[in-house]
Image (cartoon, grey):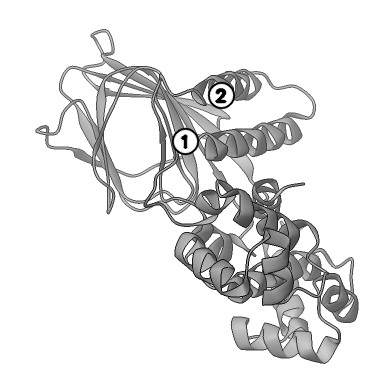
Amino acid sequence: MDALAAVVTLLKPQAIVATLVHGSGRWGVSYSKFGHPSFALVLKGPCWLSPDGIPAKILETGDFVLFPATPGFTLASDSKTKPKSMKPIPSGKQLEEVFHGDATTKPSASLLGGYFTFDSINSSMLLDLLPKMVHLRGNDPGIGSVVPIIELIKREALEKRAGQSLVLTRLIEIMLVEALRSVQSDLNATGLLAGLRDPQLATALRGIHTRTEHPWTLATLAREAGMSRSSFAARFGRVIGMTPLNYLLHWRLSVAKAMLNSGQKTVTETALAVGYESASGFSTAFSRETGQSPKQFIKTTTDVTRAKRPSR
């Protein structure tokens, strides 16, 4: 497993609801911040997308958009149309279909989209590593890997077959990996994707993500990347946006949270599995960064899980 796959796996995407969106005539809708991840493939365009805090985009036929955490946004036929404020009201169907504008005329824009959820245990820590929005143009090389997956998601959402939830979850995981690794290089970009495009940093990141239990230090990570400590630390901080040891701590605690939440390892076993020599050292770091001791975290997540279970 490489670094990107490890992040997506730890986010545990699931519970998709797919949506077909049509717009005709002059139309516009706006949604408040949603928070959950979402995606859309433009089946027919153009249409205008304006997310909060992100430059507006004209979406053309074949374009793909992914929000790891969906902000408030406006979707419209053009930038001058006053949008209608909308609130998503789930119909309970696996595939919903909505119309905006004049439903009696042929749609001028159609999108196939969907939203899903990430595991709340780690989403807040890991989403900072990903871009706020992924926008692949219909002529981008990577789009050819994403579109067939969206079509499979649509088909699976339409058909109520055995194993549907599992299949949709796996398709979402694959879509996320394909979309994220298809993002075009930006010399000014920072974060995990930028780091993975740097061959030397990618080697160090792979070590952190796949050998989390290794007793990494700045010196051993620099050696893994084939760089001097000072050069490695400077480039890592510039490209990733945090120091190598902060990133290592960030990742170890994310893995530890998933392990503790699963209940399959004790605190001591978890400490050793993520690279700490003792449970006490791990507990100190965990408490400092999360505000809870590992045992308090286990109790809190267990209580939340029980509260979500339907009563009999």
- Image side of residue 302 versus residue 177, left or right: right
User: Can you give x and y, in whole percent of width and height, for residue 107 in the image?
Assistant: 28, 13
- Image side of residue 300 versus residue 94, left or right: right
Q: Looking at the picture, which amino acid does disc 1 mark?
A: Phe
Residue assigned mark 2: 150
Query: For the residue carrying disc 1, how many other residues have a C-alpha within 10 Å: few (<14), some (14-19), or many (20+)?
Result: many
Asked which secondary structure carries label 2, the reply is helix
Q: Are marks 1 and 2 in contact (CB under 8 Å)?
A: yes
Is residue 304 among the parts visible in the rendering? no
**Residue 244 vertical placement versus 15 (above, below):** below
- Image side of residue 257 versus residue 273, left or right: left
Q: Looking at the picture, which amino acid does disc 2 mark?
A: Ile
Q: Quadrant of residue 228?
A: bottom right
User: Can you give x and y, in whole percent of width and height, for residue 283 in the image?
Assistant: 75, 87
Nearest to the observer: residue 23 or residue 123: 123
**Residue 39 vertical placement versus 216 (above, below):** above
Asked which secondary structure carries label 1, the reply is strand
**Residue 155 vertical placement versus 84 (above, below):** above
Q: Residue at x 58, y 23 (%)?
A: 145
Residue assigned mark 1: 39
Query: For the residue carrying disc 2, how many other residues have a C-alpha within 10 Å: few (<14), some (14-19), or many (20+)?
Result: many
How far apart in space, not on screen, are marks 1 and 2 (Cα)? 9 Å
Q: Quadrant of residue 100?
A: top left
